[in-house]
Amino acid sequence: MIPERIPTVPDSKEIIERSFKETKKVQDIYLPNFLNKVKSLSIQKVKMMESVARRSLGRVYDGFPKFDDLDRFERDLLFILVNGREYERSLNNLRWARAKIVELATNSIRGIKKASDLNSIGRFRSSFYGRFSSVIEDVDESLSFLRESREALKKIPQINRDMKIVIIAGFPNVGKSSLISKLTNLTPEIAVYPFTTKKINVGIMKMGNGLYEVLDVPGILNRRNHNAIERVALAALDNIGDVVLCLVDPSEECGYRLEDQVRLCQTLKESGKNVLVVENKVDLERTSSNNLKISCATGEGLDILRKKMEEYVYARQAKGNSVLQRP
């Protein structure tokens, strides 16, 4: 799963400067033999730089999730939000750089120990400094990519798979965000233009004796080619959820025909999802259909909706089959 805290990512310049700065903390020591004293100080500086860089790179590498750590839903979202192959390559580059720094330090220390004069010690030390800096600079692009990926990873919601999950789906601007604000403790951005919701909002709803997670996903149009925002919603619908509330706007105030909205609900049903079709904005338009009718503006039908949601959740549980729950 995605860690709650993903480490900040320094650039190569920060790592190099920090590593050289730490060498100033190496304390002078007294040794009768001046050559041995220079060797000891040089080795301590090399070790210090290696330690700082290894920790800096390791903190980033270890703190970012690997593909094997993620479930299908999180992997799908990761590939939507960032270039998955570049993400994996960047992490591998950091792992390589960390190992390379250790190798360079080991070889440099071995050479310094064997050095027979001050010039040789200086050459081994300077060679390490140069090659060290080159390795760190080589992964600057990977560090930059992971810095951007960190912001994308923060958009992947933390889903508690031990709780029942309800997904609110539908066309843009049909009232999904308004509904989740009525059902849960969440107050998402609400506006009167399409695709207001660009990420998955997660709220907690108390229903009966239990708690449920309710997900407000971005709007989806009933078409084959979906944009990145829509694919975020599809990743949730394809991988998680016990019930899908397919919300429609019979008033068509959302800007889309009711016929097209209903067709989306039917498509979701045909794909095997546990779908409850709900008509919102009935304060503006009320149809003669048998669909559940609510108004987020007036609160009409919300109590009935909660009871119906619970029925759908446990009806699916009785069948022993949640909606496309994948590992």
Image: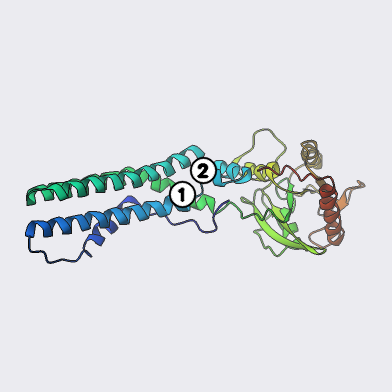
Task: Indicate the secondary structure of the residue bearing disc 1.
Answer: helix
Image coordinates for residue 85, horizontal then vertical, percent: 48, 37
Q: CA distance from mark 2 to mark 1?
A: 9 Å
Name the amino acid type tagged 1.
Answer: Glu
Q: Residues within 10 Å of mark 1 (few under 14, many from 20)?
A: few
- On the question of residue 40 being in view, the answer is yes
Q: Up-down: is 269 above or below 17? A: above
Name the amino acid type tagged 2.
Answer: Val
Residue underneath mark 2? 82
Query: Within the image, what quadrant is residue 46 found in?
Result: bottom left
Query: Within the image, what quadrant is residue 297 found in?
Result: bottom right
Residue drawn at the location 32% of the way across and 50% of the way down = 12
Task: Indicate the secondary structure of the residue bearing disc 2.
Answer: loop
Q: Residues within 10 Å of mark 2 (few under 14, many from 20)?
A: some
Identify the mark nearer the N-term, 2 or 1: 2
- On the question of residue 14 being in view, the answer is no
Residue underneath mark 1? 148
